[in-house]
Image: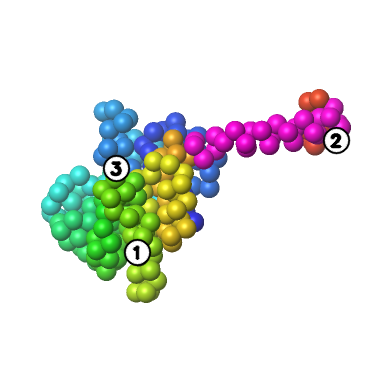
């Protein structure tokens, strides 16, 4: 399982990079908008510095036609680095761009996937990752659970190297469902991760362990303090 952080917020990336076994960070124009009018490439390079070269950085093109997407992609690679995963919408023009980028040996994530057919075409085009929008699919009355399972089956059946990086989650249940249906990766916003770690039962268990320990070994003591 690969966990990616779905944000461009530097503070959140620093925080969760220290907590989670992150595989990388994903961004898109809507996520970048939340940070205000930043120096885009400087901001992306700061993210790269935080996560390092060994982790993935996914950056999305903005142009809507193949030629524009390829120009955006080349600019991203020039201004950040050649290891960036280029996020390309799985539209008609996007599929053209995905084919060209993969022919050039570049890293590609097919994004804005709502249907199984989109996913199948992106898999056939050689995308490294496909990003189905789980919550948005459910909002459109599309069975996201069955769709992700079908995508996973197609990857296995075709012996493809493509991975599913499920995206667009509003709660922890959607994340776990996507993984249970065969998604190899998920990209999760900081607020959803916070939901997962904010259960009162977790804090209660930690408090109970501490109280039980201190009842025997003294208030404020720890295992390390026994050496002293």
Q: Which residue is mark 1?
A: 151
Q: Is residue 38 magenta?
A: no
Give the mark, 1 or 2, whose residue is nearer the N terminus. Answer: 1
> Can residue 60 be seen by looking at this rendering?
yes
* The C terminus: image quadrant: top right
Identify which residue is drawn at 41% across, 33% down: 10
User: CB under 8 Å between callouts 1 and 2?
Assistant: no
How would you rate the neighbour count of disc 1 (Cα within 10 Å): few for under 14, some for 14-19, many for 20 or more?
A: many
Identify which residue is drawn at 34% across, 35% down: 43
Disc 3 is placed on an element classified as: loop
Quadrant position of residue 120: bottom left
Q: Nearer the viewer, residue 9 or 100?
A: 9
Q: Which residue is mark 2?
A: 227
The answer to whether 91 appears left or right of 134 in the picture is: left
**Whole-percent x, y for residue 190 in the image:** 44, 37
Disc 1 is placed on an element classified as: helix
Q: Which residue is mark 3?
A: 28
Give the mark, 3 or 1, whose residue is nearer the N terminus. Answer: 3
Identify which residue is drawn at 33% across, 60% down: 147
Task: Please provide the residue range marked out in magenta.
Answer: 194-218
**Whole-percent x, y for residue 124 in the image:** 27, 69
The answer to whether 207 appears left or right of 141 in the picture is: right
Of badges 1 and 2, nearer the viewer stands: 1
Q: Nearer the viewer, residue 33 or 217?
A: 217
């Amino acid at each position: 399982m690969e966990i990616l952080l779905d944000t461009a917020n530097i503070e959140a990336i620093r925080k969760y990079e220290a907590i989670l076994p992150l595989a990388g960070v994903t961004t898109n124009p809507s996520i970048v908008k939340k940070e205000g009018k930043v120096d885009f490439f400087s901001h992306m390079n700061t993210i790269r510095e935080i996560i390092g070269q060994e982790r993935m950085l996914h950056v999305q093109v903005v142009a809507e036609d193949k030629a524009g997407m390829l120009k955006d992609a080349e600019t991203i690679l020039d201004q950040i680095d050649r290891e960036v995963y280029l996020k390309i919408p799985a539209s008609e023009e996007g599929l053209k761009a995905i084919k060209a980028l993969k022919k050039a040996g570049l890293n590609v994530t097919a994004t804005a996937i709502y249907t199984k057919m989109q996913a199948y075409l992106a898999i056939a085009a050689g995308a490294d990752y496909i990003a189905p929008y789980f919550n948005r699919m459910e909002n459109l009355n599309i069975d996201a659970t069955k769709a992700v399972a079908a995508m996973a089956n197609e990857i296995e059946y075709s012996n493809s190297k493509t991975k599913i990086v499920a995206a667009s989650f509003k709660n922890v249940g959607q994340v776990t469902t996507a993984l249970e249906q065969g998604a190899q990766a998920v990209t999760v916003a900081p607020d959803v991760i916070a939901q997962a770690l904010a259960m009162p039962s977790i804090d209660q268990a930690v408090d109970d362990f501490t109280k039980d320990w201190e009842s025997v070994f003294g208030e404020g003591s720890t295992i390390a303090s026994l050496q002293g």
